[in-house]
């Protein structure tokens, strides 16, 4: 499954049973001390990154230039002084972006957050809050488009609470990466049509060739169609999947955009494992709008009403006939109507216990996993069996919190160690996402 994801994301920190973004699976090395980051590791990372660019980058010619650039830099010794993976990842990212015209979907992930990375806003699948404002106007804040199992139920709850409003402001000023199906789902709430509407295509390179394939994306059924006016707030931080939503709705003339020109990242990202705990995000495809025939790569999405992003909410309300006395949702909200879930899902603790036992035996009950989760688990089962059998029987499982993106977080203590779990169950009770990481020994 293709994922449109932000080039500003942090490194992969979890040993994934199934990846959090888009339902795609990315196997990670088992818990343990990281390998030494030396000349051999740097050389292996450059070699594998170069191969990935030659085989997968959406433009074969640019992919070849990018590969040759980092190979030459390695030969010159440009990377010799980088003894830490994160610093090396940042340097490699800069070199690759210089060749790819600052493609924001190109990033080497070094196993830790880049300097200055902020903690994500607490959300449920990316939905942060919904409020009713003066004048029967709704407000919806979304910061990422999580996988459908997380995003769709949260969006449905928020939109149901806002159904009766005469206008809706969707705050996309911090909306960045996300899953392709969730792009279509959000846009579909604002499209009135008995038949699916063609929104956009993703044109992807067939790896190892100079041929391409096209996948079409359409509007999909939602519980209802929102009938009021729609205003989208944008900023220079609106990126990738966030830009896809605002560009598509602007092209359909279904929304007015207020704020700043967006970041300009229209490609679709793939993640490729490198070496020494590194991973490479690169553009394997490009988005193409069904109406305009093009996209916003490098140029960004230009708003209909230009204003600094800090003033966008106030300006939007003025356009809707209001006289706001502030420019923040905290000052303007009259009634919060949605907040991210904070209580554990029924059955999640039992799933942690059951999956721990099944993995230790090497016998997952695939009937209790979603199809995507089952697909992600099958190729990893031998590694999972060793990890969980070495840990031994479960001694205790304790709920910690609903994590920042909406997955339940548990601490599980085993006979020979501890893990932190993040897990999500679907409406049918099946596990649709799970990820674990080791916890330090208790003193």
Image (cartoon, grey):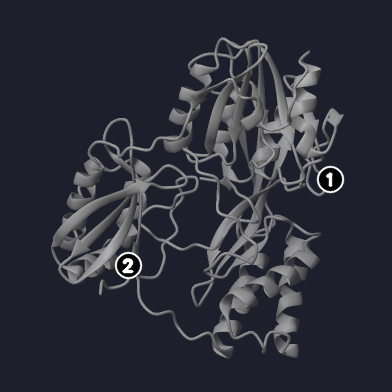
Q: Are marks 1 and 2 in contact (CB under 8 Å)?
A: no
Of the pair 258 and 318, the residue shown nearer to us: 318
Crowd band around label 2 with a 10 angstrom C-alpha radius: few (<14), some (14–19), many (20+): some
What label sits on residue 185 in the rendered view? Answer: none
Q: Secondary structure at mark 1?
A: loop
Residue 414 higher or lower than 83, as above or below: above
Tell me how many marks there are. Answer: 2
Dot 1: within a 10 Å radius of its alpha carbon, few (fewer than 14), some, or many (20 or more) residues?
Answer: few
In which quarter of the view is residue 326 placed? Answer: top right
Q: Residue at x 67, y 67 (%)?
A: 54
Identify which residue is drawn at 57% across, 23% down. 131
Q: Position of residue 96 (x, y in %)?
A: 73, 68
Q: Looking at this view, is 274 or 63 the one in front?
A: 274
Query: Which residue bears the numbered disc 2?
Result: 439
- Does dot 2 land on a helix, a strand or a loop? loop
Whether residue 440 is visible: yes
Could one spot residue 290 in this view of the protein? no
Mark 1 or 2, closer to the camera: 2
Q: In this rendering, is residue 284 above or below 385? A: above
Seen at 32% across and 30% down, the residue is 427
Residue at figure coordinates x 83%, y 36% from the top left: 302
Q: Position of residue 364 (x, y in %)?
A: 21, 52
Q: Quadrant of residue 149?
A: top left
Quadrant of residue 230 in the image? top right
Q: Position of residue 166 (x, y in %)?
A: 65, 10
Q: Is residue 129 above or below residue 175?
A: above
State the residue position of label 1: 299
* Mark 1 or 2, nearer chain start: 1
């Amino acid at each position: 499954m293709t994922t449109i994801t932000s080039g500003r994301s942090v490194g992969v920190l979890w040993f994934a049973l199934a990846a959090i973004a888009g339902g795609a699976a990315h196997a990670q090395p088992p818990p343990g001390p990281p390998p030494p980051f030396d000349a051999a590791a740097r050389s292996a990372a450059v070699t594998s990154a170069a191969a990935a660019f030659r085989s997968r980058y959406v433009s074969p010619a640019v992919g070849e230039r990018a590969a040759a650039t980092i190979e030459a830099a390695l030969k010159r010794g440009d990377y010799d002084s980088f003894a830490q993976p994160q610093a090396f990842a940042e340097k490699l990212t800069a070199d690759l972006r210089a060749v790819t015209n600052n493609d924001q979907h190109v990033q080497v992930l070094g196993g830790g957050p880049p300097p200055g990375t902020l903690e994500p806003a607490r959300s449920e699948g990316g939905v942060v809050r919904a409020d009713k404002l003066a004048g029967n106007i709704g407000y919806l804040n979304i910061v990422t488009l999580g996988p459908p199992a997380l995003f769709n139920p949260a969006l449905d709850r928020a939109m149901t609470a806002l159904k009766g409003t005469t206008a809706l402001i969707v705050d996309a000023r911090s909306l960045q990466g996300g899953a392709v199906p969730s792009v279509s789902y959000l846009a579909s709430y604002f499209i009135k049509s008995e038949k699916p509407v063609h929104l956009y295509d993703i044109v992807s390179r067939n790896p190892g060739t100079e041929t391409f394939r096209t996948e079409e994306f359409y509007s999909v059924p939602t519980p209802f169609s929102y009938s009021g006016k729609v205003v989208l707030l944008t900023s220079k931080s609106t990126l990738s999947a966030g830009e896809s939503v605002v560009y598509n709705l602007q092209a359909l003339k279904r929304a007015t955009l207020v704020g700043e020109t967006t970041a300009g990242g229209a490609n679709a990202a793939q993640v490729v494992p490198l070496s020494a705990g590194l991973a490479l995000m690169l553009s394997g495809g490009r988005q193409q709008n069904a109406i305009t025939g093009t996209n916003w790569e490098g140029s960004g999405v230009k708003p209909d009403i230009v204003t600094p992003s800090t003033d966008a909410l106030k300006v939007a309300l003025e356009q809707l006939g209001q006289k706001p006395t502030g420019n923040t949702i905290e000052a303007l909200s009259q009634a919060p109507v949605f907040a991210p879930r904070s209580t554990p899902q029924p059955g999640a603790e039992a799933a942690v216990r059951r999956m721990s036992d099944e993995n230790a035996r090497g016998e997952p009950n695939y009937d209790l996993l979603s199809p995507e989760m089952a697909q992600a688990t099958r190729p990893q089962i031998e590694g999972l069996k060793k990890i969980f059998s070495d840990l031994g029987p479960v001694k205790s499982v304790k709920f910690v919190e609903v994590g920042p993106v909406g997955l339940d977080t548990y601490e599980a203590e085993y006979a020979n160690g501890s893990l932190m779990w993040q897990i999500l169950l679907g409406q049918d009770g099946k596990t649709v996402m799970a990820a674990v990481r080791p916890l330090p020994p208790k003193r």
